[in-house]
Image (tube, coloured by chain):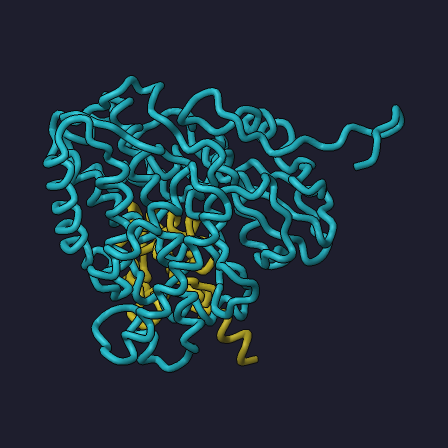
Amino acid sequence: MTTETHTDPEPPMRLPVDRTSLLDPPEGLAALRESCPVSPLTYADGHVGWLVTSYRMARAVLQDDRFSSRPELRHSAVHLVLGDGQPPEEDVPGMFVGMDPPEHTRYRKLITGELSVRRMRELEPSIARTAGRLLDDVVAAGPGADLVSLFCSPLPSLVICELLGVPYSGWQRIRPVSEKMLRTDSTAEEVKACFAAIFEFLAEVVALKHREPADDLVSGLVALDELTDVEITAVAFQLFTAGHETTANMLSLGTYTLLTHPDQLALLRADPDLMESAVEELLRYLTVIQFGISRAALTDVDLDGTLVRAGQTVTVSLPAANRDPERFADPDVLDVRRPAAGNVAFGFGVHQCVAQQLARAEMRIGYRTLLERLPGLRLATPAAEVPMRDGAIVYGAASLPVVW
Amino acid sequence: MPTLLIEADRELCAGAGMCALVAPDLFDQTDADGTVVVLRAEVSGPALALARECVRNCPTGALSVRPRGDEVRTTRRGGG
């Protein structure tokens, strides 16, 4: 690092990550959005790129194919933290989250039919059965039970396992590994080892589906005969890992949010038909991908008068974009009745979360099950003392002790 | 009351399903790859407002609404 002299300008700021209010985006993003929505940003390794904080520019960047999703082209805004979501080795075929069209398109098209709105509504009874069984465990554990470990974390992983075709016995085997992956006290090395174990586990599931095909997503990909086994494993790995931490944290943080906004909770209890709208508003309000998503410019790009040079990384702050008053009136107010569709919690453009409709179904059923089965649900500790996942790629509650 | 036509570009569509989520009477998705199926192309009044919302929310810009008659003019231009 060069010594700064009196002639060197200040290096641009680093990504704001500290929160003063548990459920609002990190300090400093709102001011940037208002004064300079495409602002210079210093990355963890010293690279200088750009931070986008307005809704309009967030959509513009994420819909522009001059910006690449390839991980080797991008710099990281924060030092490597938990939940980076990258597979254990480099260059694993089938990791479409890090590809650009047309390679990206080919993989996605093989699974988007399985993850449609209608298919996910059809899955709701099965999700409800799973949620009900987990609630039995919560009730059996008694007052003071931790909703994260007993409900919010296992629900999405059980549902994705059922969708993929992982046998229940397999889920029981992989459960401690996937739990460890989420723990905020796991080291980066341990998390990497968890990814490797999950990848190996899913490769065994793919082999099983060759021998004993069934009516599930992995068997479907095997039967298509279009992908290699490694590619199918990579697809399953992305669905498993990307869909676990995110939904688990929306379930925990969303429950915490409802319990700390009693007026909104009362509206929802009085009119359960508000659930779909409430899920959308919680997605917008909480935007758990707290450090945003990044792209690398493949050529020079003019962003509203700011010149982004080829090779620079652009970080789109999803939390900032979802609190943009130009798009959402009174954006810092939680209002379960507002039309929040169009928010960018799941990103935007061709990479918008492939299983977002599954996530919505899990949240609809998850929150509904909690509220129906536990009418007296409330926090067991003071709200300010609930531990949050500071520093993790996906924000949420680290644990959520409740009484009812 | 003006009537407009919903148009969907199946090449641009990524199968996200936001249209089917918000307006299930207007949009569905194929089983094959989740791309958009326009159930009702002619819209006016509240349905038009809903269609415009779906156009706005579409992550890939695959949806649009246009006045009736435009597509006929395009065909004639293309054939000339």
- x 20%, y 60%: residue: A168
Image quadrant of residue B5? Answer: bottom left
- x 37%, y 27%: residue: A387
Colour displayed for chain B in the image of the structure: yellow
Q: Is residue A215 left or right of residue A355?
A: left
Image quadrant of residue B33? Answer: bottom left
A287 over A114 or under it: above or below: above
Q: Position of residue B34 (x, y in %)?
A: 34, 65
Q: Position of residue A373 (x, y in %)?
A: 10, 36
- x 44%, y 72%: residue: A230
Q: Is residue A134 left or right of residue A247?
A: left
Q: Count the marks: how many? A: 0
Q: Is residue B7 visible?
A: no
Q: Closer to the camera, B53 or A351?
A: A351
Q: Position of residue B36 (x, y in %)?
A: 35, 64
B69 over A365 or under it: above or below: below
Q: Is residue A55 visible?
A: yes
A355 over B29 or under it: above or below: above
Q: Which chain is cyan?
A: A
- x 34%, y 27%: residue: A334
Quarter in which the N terminus of chain A is drawn: top right
Q: Position of residue A380 (x, y in %)?
A: 22, 22
Q: Closer to the camera, A197 or A77?
A: A197
A333 over A151 or under it: above or below: above
Q: Closer to the camera, A306 or A142?
A: A142
Q: Is residue A320 left or right of residue A361?
A: right
Quarter in which the C terminus of chain A is drawn: top left
Q: Is residue A255 left or right of residue B75?
A: left
